[in-house]
Amino acid sequence: MGDIQIKKSTEKYDVIIVGSGAGGGMAGYVLAKAGVKVLMLEAGPFFDPAKDSKQLQWPWQSPRRGASVTRAFGDFDGAYGGWQIDGEPYTLKDDTEFTWFRSHMLGGRTNHWGRISLRMGPHDFKGKTFDGATDDWPISYDDVKPYYDKVDRLIGVYGTVEGLENDPDGIFLPPPAPRLNEIFIMQGAKKAGVKVIPGRGSVLTKPLPGNNDRGACFFCGQCNRSCKAYADFSSSSCLVIPAIKTGNLKVIPNAMVREVVVGKDGLAKGVSYISKDDMMEYQVNAGIVILAASACSSARILLNSKSTTHPNGLANSSGIIGKYLHDSTGAGMSGILPQLLDRKRYNEDGVGSAQILGPWVLDNKKLDFPRGYHIEFGGGMRMPSYGFGSNVPVVNGILPGRDGKMKDAGGFGKSLKDDYRRFYGANVGMSGRGMAIARESNYCEIDPNVVDKYGIPVLRFYYKWTDAEIKQAKHMQETFESIMHAMGAIITSKPAGKEDNYGLHTPGDIIHEVGTARMGDDPKTSALNKWCQAHDCKNLFVTDGAPFVQQGDKNPTWTILALSMRTSEYIIDQIQKKNL
Amino acid sequence: MNRRESLKALGITTISTGLLLDACKTDDKKLKPVSGADDLGDTELTGLEEFEKERLRKLKKEPAFFNEHERATLIALGDWIIPKDEVSGSASDAKVIDFIEFIVKDIPEHQVPLRGGLKWLDVQCLNRYEHSFTGSTEQQQLEILEEIAYPKKAKPEMHQGAVFFSRLRDLVATGFYTSEIGVKDIGYAGNVPGHWDGVPKDVLAQYNLSDV
């Protein structure tokens, strides 16, 4: 075996961005548009939805028919990777549970996400002030609102103006019309006293004003595959590829970052990475380094970036990197709407994001847990894929046949074949996504014993739910049940109870993990200042989910985009003022 | 237990052991790949990671997992589960067996339950009808399927058969309804660029939702 060499690039960039998802993509876009020379390192391959999406493929065009063998959400899904990646392990501490979804590819997880685009509300930013249950951010909703507005205009989001206290309205495109099952859900929810509004999603239900590079939605309902017409938001299609076109941004794919290289002055000098193409070590330099590798990957890079000036890892004099890790809570319920048996067939693909949404509007004074959750709904006449109809031989014993007679569950032959048709499109599902409290005691750290196949020390997780999250899941189940009953649905999912934390998902399952390098005014209790700039290293920024002090019950992507845009404008300002 | 003892334990003393052996033995001879070993076109390979492409190519080239007897039994069972009717063709018309042959290599957890379940079924039939499942009469096949096709009603001694049948039924349903024939049968009308204006008027009227 030959000597290991580190290839040092002589090319100098203004900024290096690690990661190309929502946070990295937005930073790359804003900076490149402003004429800043940017190098973007992405741990996975290049991915352009226009060429690489599986959109409009039929189930028979995959021999595994969409089964989740190589991709967690099936082989038409737009996200590479998943909760387990060969050769890139992570470990758990003390029998706690955490599951970590990674997608190494241009655009990262934004290629397949649900496009549910929610702003955090005033209370979400100021939780301590509001009810004391969580910490305050150093910034308020009013600080972020102008950036949410700009993100809405730049990327596009549909929705309706509702005037809700903690679910701020945006600049909306028209929402899609509800499907039949969604009309029944809205009626049932109304009866049950649960608020349901049109959904909010980053899908271009109409052409985006002033943008000629992206097409409008053609309603195939397959946003999870990524859109060939660029009609939904993926960081690849909407941010990185346009940034490349400016000539100011270069992407190096398959570059797995090892650490941030620090100079004698304690400032970031560049980044070292291993290329998956040739397994060689590289180092690239720039005046500014932005980490946007995903909350946990960025924490891992920081913790692995130990130097004489930063012996605890970079930006970690407070010892806070990795701590306050939190993922949204999640629980679900599914059922059958008997009124939809034998329903008429027509195309109801709609959009592939939430067409309706149940925002959290309840008063916690009457509840035994803080804050709450929003509800997402599913169901309808979807494209068959692996697992199709597997509930039919179960539910055909619960509901009477067309002749009004009951029969045993199961069966075969013409009568079963008829049941598959009878039950098609009659299913309905509900999922809660809620606020989990960011706690210092939930964290990721470097496992002292384990490295991945690139020789990079891996993360070890410690995460425990508490009563606050479990009681919230219980409330979700009760709410779902009340809606199911009010619309005459039959619940088919396994009843959830105390013994399984009311169906509360394993932390990490919901893929909203944030908080591992939180911002704050006090360098002793935070890693970054309110501009996502490291207290300990002024030319280092983090623009993914890591700076979150506390998420709300909102999916984090829209906030990541807004904060990344805000940070990028701050960087431009600081460059102009020669502070950086 | 040697073979004679096990046959005795099964209550089989007089029937042809050759038949039993034939039904139960795994083919030693190297099986050829089934079909479509090199039919991976641009559509299938679009947007796949390199390791995903390699995996598909490798699996497609692997020899068949099921021997000819197992394959014939699976085809017969598939057509019992999804027969031809006035709307569409059968599981075998939709080449469900090719999907099953692929998926047991792709998801190896299916292999033992399916292979073992097929043997369980053959031994049951042999016990009762002195023939393997496919060698039994249509009436006999129907009789045994009735005993394993309704999990809640299956007698305790038939539970393993019911578990096997439920797994196979789900795989057959996937194989059929994800085929061109099956998608047409179920009436899925999407996967085409179009416009979504909401629920059609006649459907709203059907559910008294015209005012919504």
Image: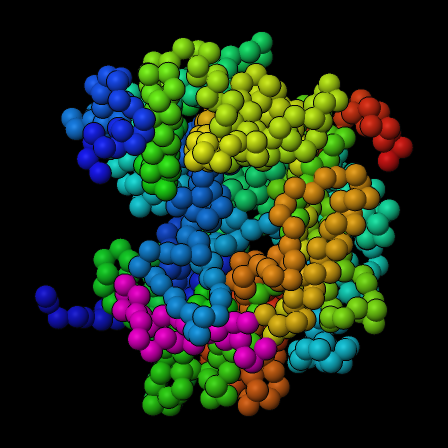
Residue A281 lies, in percent from the top left, at 25, 67
Q: Is residue A138 left or right of residue B72?
A: right
Q: Is residue A456 magenta?
A: yes
Residue A404 lies, in percent from the top left, at 75, 22
Residue farthest right in this picture: B211
Tell me: residue A97, above or below residue A359: below
Point out the image quarter for the N terminus of chain A. bottom left
Q: Is residue B67 magenta?
A: no
Q: Residue at coordinates 28% horizontally, 58% vertically from top-left?
A: A276
Residue range in magenta is A439-464
Residue A30 lies, in percent from the top left, at 55, 63
Residue B59 lies, in percent from the top left, at 28, 35
Q: Is residue A386 left or right of residue A355?
A: left
Q: Nearer the viewer, residue B42 or A212?
A: B42
Residue A544 at least partly seen: yes
Q: Is residue A129 left or right of residue B54?
A: right
Q: Residue at coordinates 37% horizontally, 79% vertically from top-left?
A: A305
